[in-house]
Image (cartoon, grey):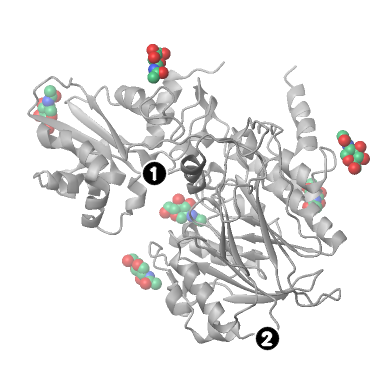
């Protein structure tokens, strides 16, 4: 009887696309796309971090890269039909953060062939493409050539070992004319002023780049209807985009400018002025950003220069329900052959890497920021009441074990905890270390110090190679936090939304999310959590062993020094036989959570 199952799955699969184990999207009230008939329309992705297989435990974001390909196909068709244009933009951080990328050896063995099946009009690098020399090298060798006409890098150079020189990573800008409207676009692709890259690349500071002759010459290009600035740069509060905006306006005072940004993982839409706007489209393939410009000049179809372009935006939840609705298709007409093939390639890659291997099943959801700490549904509480005490139970000496909450990246959902889950929840590869026989008085204050005045005072003392941001817990997207403060419990529309998700507020108001969501409550969580192992707090101890994850070693040493106990790296030793947080969690799950 089992022999029938693959057949049945294959059948279901061919009809529905997305990944076979993905949950079906839940219907929810939708807002229409602000499509510009006869104008310019854009789809934007950013910070996808390897999530091209979609979210297999969250129905709201369950479509995959193959579905996105089908979706773009239908919107291109619509543009051809109504004389408008559709352009696709991606602004970097395509790698690192999901098993589809991270679980292969070498990393990314499958993702590049998958990603390149989507035609792009403008694509730029992000900082995650640059941390490791072999990642940026491969980006340069493969991805830049995959997107030969579209890849733009205005301020990035890479070392060529043959010539012994740094050379441009990709063309620094590009001028092109849109297919249907004949809009003449001048496009740039910027990286924020990033310094954490390997030494085979160099990011030229934006303030220097905009003074270069090629950039100044480009701004003076004749017959440009629209400046398009894509980049791995936040659209708001970013010195880099402000500088670029001013540099353009110093030369051309009136031509519309559109910015596409990323890096901070939020949904955002910023008005620079009435002819210059920017969009940022979230993270992890949760969001397909949509932006339209109507009333922009074009050279075809008898259109004359328009004086007042209108910019509108929508943040599309990445699921089939939204995509079918916005493309006017249904379950039988939605997926295209290329789209289906890509979904199948993703499925085959996940299978080859055994990403569905199950360690155990979570009995409930455990949240990083969506539950208060401490509480029964807090993931950090699960760690400090169960996982860490069970794991370190066999320590011979009394110990204090601390870990930073930033070591945990994502929630655990009720249901199977798989190899894939380990990459989502704790992708970091560093292990635990310890200091033996630390005076109890000092050791017992480290946690408090790192949580209170800790992060700011300490960060200035620590060697700059460790980024303070990584010690701190990942905060929920700003758009969500803003909502908590501004709107409280107020409902935006009369209809009661039931699907929890983003409730974004940006410069155009609170109607940007395509799906009308129920607001999610987010909670602040501590920087570090800790447990006492092998003693109870009323015991009077002289010394304890202090165990911590390696990532926060510099902070721990600085904290101890601040408390009057000076230790160096040479005083530390490996703990837990080199097991990482990922090993600890998956091992614990295997022993404690049964399935079925
Ligand atoms: C780059 O090197 C790291 C380890 O140094 C390895 O895990 C990864 O697979 C390599 N990536 C590529 C693309 O070769
Ligand atoms: C980068 O650093 C490595 C190791 O420090 C060194 O061997 C190499 O020459 C450097 N490469 C460049 C391009 O500076
Ligand atoms: C889907 O749409 C097509 C074309 O509009 C139509 O012919 C077909 O009957 C629809 N199928 C379903 C299942 O609704
Ligand atoms: C899709 O995959 C099938 C089977 O591998 C292949 O024959 C076909 O040419 C592919 N189609 C496209 C459009 O790539
Ligand atoms: C947590 O769960 C325990 C046992 O199920 C229960 O007794 C306790 O009241 C719960 N605590 C909270 C804060 O919900
Ligand atoms: C604690 O560790 C020390 C080594 O640092 C060792 O000499 C001592 O016996 C240990 N104490 C216990 C109770 O195991």
In depth, the one of 574 and 37 nearer the eye is 37
Which image quadrant is residue 255 in?
A: bottom right
Q: Residue at x 38, y 65 (%)?
A: 195
Q: Quadrant of the C terminus?
A: top right
Q: Which residue is mark 1?
A: 429
Q: Please say if 123 is above or below 570.
A: below
Where is residue 33? Give x, y as percent: 73, 50
Q: Residue at x 28, y 26 (%)?
A: 392
Q: Quadrant of the N terminus?
A: top right
Q: Residue at x 54, y 18 (%)?
A: 595
Q: Quadrant of ligand 6?
A: top left
How many other residues sit within 10 Å of disc 2, few (<14), some (14-19) or many (≥20)? Answer: few
Give the label, 1 or 2, closer to the camera: 2
How many other residues sit within 10 Å of disc 1, few (<14), some (14-19) or many (≥20)? Answer: some
Q: Residue at x 61, y 39 (%)?
A: 492
In depth, the one of 431 and 491 nearer the eye is 491
In depth, the one of 121 and 130 nearer the eye is 121
Q: Please say if 542 is above or below 334.
A: above
The tally of labels here is 2
> In this image, 381 relative to 32: left or right?
left
Give the label on residue 222, or none: 2
């Amino acid at each position: 009887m089992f022999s029938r199952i693959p057949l049945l799955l294959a059948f279901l699969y061919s009809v529905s696309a997305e990944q076979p184990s993905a949950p079906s999207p839940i219907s929810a009230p939708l807002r229409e796309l602000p499509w510009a008939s006869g104008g310019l329309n854009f789809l934007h992705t950013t910070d996808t971090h390897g999530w091209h297989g979609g979210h297999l435990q969250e129905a709201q974001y369950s479509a995959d890269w193959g579905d996105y390909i089908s979706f773009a196909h239908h919107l291109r068709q619509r543009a051809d039909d109504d004389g408008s244009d559709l352009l696709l933009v991606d602004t970097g951080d395509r790698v690192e953060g999901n098993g589809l990328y991270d679980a292969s050896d070498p990393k990314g063995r499958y993702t590049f062939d998958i990603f390149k099946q989507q035609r792009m009009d403008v694509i730029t690098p992000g900082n995650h493409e640059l941390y490791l020399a072999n990642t940026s090298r491969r980006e340069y060798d493969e991805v830049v050539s995959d997107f030969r006409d579209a890849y733009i890098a205005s301020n990035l150079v890479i070392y060529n070992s043959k010539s012994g020189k740094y050379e441009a990573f990709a063309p620094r800008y590009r001028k092109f004319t849109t297919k249907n409207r004949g809009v003449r676009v001048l496009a740039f692709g910027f990286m924020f002023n990033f310094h954490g890259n390997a030494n085979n690349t160099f990011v030229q500071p934006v303030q220097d780049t905009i003074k270069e002759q090629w950039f100044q010459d480009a701004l003076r290009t004749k017959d440009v209807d629209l400046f398009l600035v894509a980049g791995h740069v936040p659209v708001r509060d970013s010195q880099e985009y402000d500088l670029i905006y001013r540099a353009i306006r110093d030369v051309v005072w009136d031509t519309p400018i559109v910015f596409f940004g990323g890096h901070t993982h939020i949904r955002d839409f910023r008005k620079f002025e009435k002819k210059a706007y920017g969009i940022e489209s979230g993270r992890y393939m949760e969001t397909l950003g949509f932006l339209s410009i109507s009333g922009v000049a074009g050279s075809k179809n008898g259109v004359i220069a328009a004086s007042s372009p209108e910019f509108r935006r929508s943040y599309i939840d990445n699921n089939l329900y939204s995509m079918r609705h916005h493309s006017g298709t249904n379950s039988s007409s939605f997926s295209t052959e290329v789209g289906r093939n890509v979904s199948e390639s993703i499925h085959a890659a996940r299978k080859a890497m055994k990403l569905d291997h199950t360690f155990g099943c979570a009995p409930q959801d455990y949240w990083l920021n969506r539950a208060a700490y401490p509480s029964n549904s807090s993931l950090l509480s699960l760690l400090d009441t169960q996982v860490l005490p069970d794991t370190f139970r066999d320590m011979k000496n009394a110990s204090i074990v601390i870990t930073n909450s930033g070591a945990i990246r994502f929630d655990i959902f009720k249901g199977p905890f798989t190899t894939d889950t380990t990459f989502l929840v704790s992708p970091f590869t560093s292990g635990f270390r310890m200091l033996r026989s630390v005076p109890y008085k000092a050791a017992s204050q480290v946690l408090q110090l790192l949580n209170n005045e800790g992060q700011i005072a300490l960060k200035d003392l620590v060697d700059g190679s460790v980024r303070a941001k990584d010690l701190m817990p990942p905060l929920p997207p700003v758009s969500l936090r803003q909502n908590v403060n501004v709107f409280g419990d107020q409902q935006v529309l009369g209809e009661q939304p039931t699907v929890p998700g983003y409730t974004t507020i940006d410069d155009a108001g609170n109607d940007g999310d395509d799906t009308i969501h129920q607001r999610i409550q987010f909670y602040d969580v501590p920087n570090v959590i800790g447990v006492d192992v092998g003693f109870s707090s009323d015991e009077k101890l002289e010394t304890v062993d202090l165990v911590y994850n390696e990532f926060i070693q510099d902070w721990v040493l600085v904290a101890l020094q601040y408390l009057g106990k000076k230790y160096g790296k040479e005083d530390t030793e490996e703990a837990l036989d080199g097991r990482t947080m990922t090993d600890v969690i998956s091992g614990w799950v295997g022993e404690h959570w049964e399935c079925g």
